[in-house]
Amino acid sequence: MSSSQHIVEEHYTDRKPYVRARVVIINLETGRQAAIERDFWIDTGFDGGIHVAQSHKPDITMIGVNPVPGSVSVAGGATNVAYRCLAYLQRLGDHEFPMPGIETELVLHGSSGHGLIGLDILKRWTARFDGPKELLTITEH
Amino acid sequence: MSQCTVLGISPSEEEQFQVATTILPRAIEQGVHRIDRESDLRLASLGRMESTAPLRYGSLLLEDYSRSIESHGFPSDKPWLPPTALKLLGKLKTGSITEKEVLKLMDLVAERASAHFQLSEGKFVAMTFHGRIVEASDTRVGLLKKIQTRKQEESIFVWRIGSNAFSGRL
C-alpha cells in the first residue's frame, strides 16, 4: 500500500511548470513578517532554495531583516551580486505546510516577474514533469 | 612554534631550526607577494571587460555598507589582504564601486580567508569584507539561520568555499 501524498498536481501555465506559492520572511526577534505570494517556476536547474526579484528587498528590510550580499550564478555562466535571507515556504499550490513552513534560502536578485523554486526545496519530494500532458506532480513519500 | 619543541633537541638541530625560522617568514612573504601579483593581473584583465558605471541607490544599496566597513579583526596599518582588495575596500567605503568590483572583492577576501583558515571546500561561510569569519555551516539554511539573529558590527557577505556562487544555475 502506497503512503505517498500529492503536494502539487497542476497543469502548466504558458507551457511552463509554474506553481503559486507563499513565502514568508520572519523577524525572529520581533515576530514581524513579510509575505511574498506569486507564481514560481519549478526550476531543477537552480540549486538554491527560492529566488525572487530584488524589488522585494525593501519589504524585507522594513520588518528589520537585512538580507546579506553574496553571489549568484545565472544562466550563461555569469555571476551577479545577490542578497539572501532565511525564509519559510508556507504554501505551494493548494498545499499548506505546518507552521512556520519549510525553512529555506531566499535569494533576492534581478527583476524577473516570476520566482524560482530550486533543488534545495525540491530535494525532499518526487517531482514529475509530464511534458505531453503538461502536468506537474510533486509527491511526498 | 612553542619553546617546548626546541628544548629537547641537540645543538646542531637547534642551529638548523634557527636557520629555518629565519628563512620561513621570507618564504611566506614571497608567497604573499606572488599571490598579490597574480591578483593584480587577474583584476587588470577583468577591468578591461567591466562597466565603470558606479552602483546607484536602489540597485545594490551599497551605501548601506559604506558607513560600516570598519576593520575590527585586523588593524588597518597591517592589512593581510592583497593591495587589490584594499583598493576595492576603499571604493566600497566611498560607494563608488561597480558590481563586478564587489564580486571581485568578495572573491579575493574569500580566497585569502579560506586559505588562511583552511576552510574545506563546499562550506557555507559568512565573513566580513576584511576576511574575518563570522559563521560557517555545512548548509545554506544552516548558515542563514545562524546569522539571521546576530547583530553585526561590521558588514558581512556569504560565500560558498571553492565556488564562485552561493547558489544559482547549475
Image (tube, coloured by chain):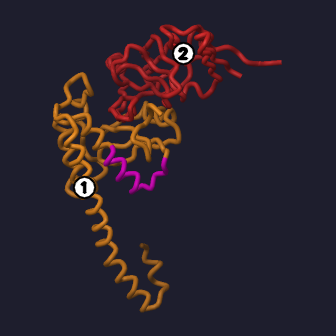
Chain colours: A red, B orange
| Crowdedness near tag 2: few (<14), some (14–19) or many (≥20) residues, C-alpha within 10 Å | many
- The image shows residue B24, relative to residue B84, as above or below, that is below
> Magenta residues, as a range?
B107-121
Query: What is the x, y in percent for residue B103?
Result: 30, 39
Query: What is the x, y in percent for residue B140?
Result: 49, 35
The quarter of the rendered structure image containing the N terminus of chain B is bottom left
| Crowdedness near tag 1: few (<14), some (14–19) or many (≥20) residues, C-alpha within 10 Å | few
Residue with the most extreme right position: A1
Residue identified by numbered label 1: B79
Residue with the most extreme front position: A132
Q: Which residue is drawn at 62% across and 15% down?
A: A130
Residue A61 sits in quarter? top left
Residue B135 seen by the camera: no
Inspect the image, locate mark 1, and give the three-letter code of the amino acid beneath it.
Pro
Query: What is the x, y in percent for residue A24?
Result: 47, 17
Answer with left or right where residue A138 lies relative to residue B51: right
Query: What is the x, y in percent for residue B118?
Result: 45, 56
Q: Which of A30 and B58 is in front in this view?
A: B58
Asked if the residue under mark 1 is in contact with the one under mark 2, i.e. CB atoms within 8 Å, the reply is no
Answer with left or right where residue B7 lies relative to residue A98: left
Per the image, is B113 magenta?
yes
Q: Which residue is drawn at 38% across and 32% down?
A: A76
Where residue B102 is drawn, which disc sits there? none
Inspect the image, locate mark 2, and give the three-letter code of the amino acid beneath it.
Gln
Per the image, is A44 magenta?
no
Q: What element carries label 1?
A: loop
Q: Is mark 2 on a helix, strand or loop?
A: strand
- The image shows residue A26, relative to residue B126, as above or below, that is above
Residue identified by numbered label 2: A90
Q: Which residue is drawn at 35% across and 38% down?
A: B157
Q: Which of A133 and B10 is in front in this view?
A: A133
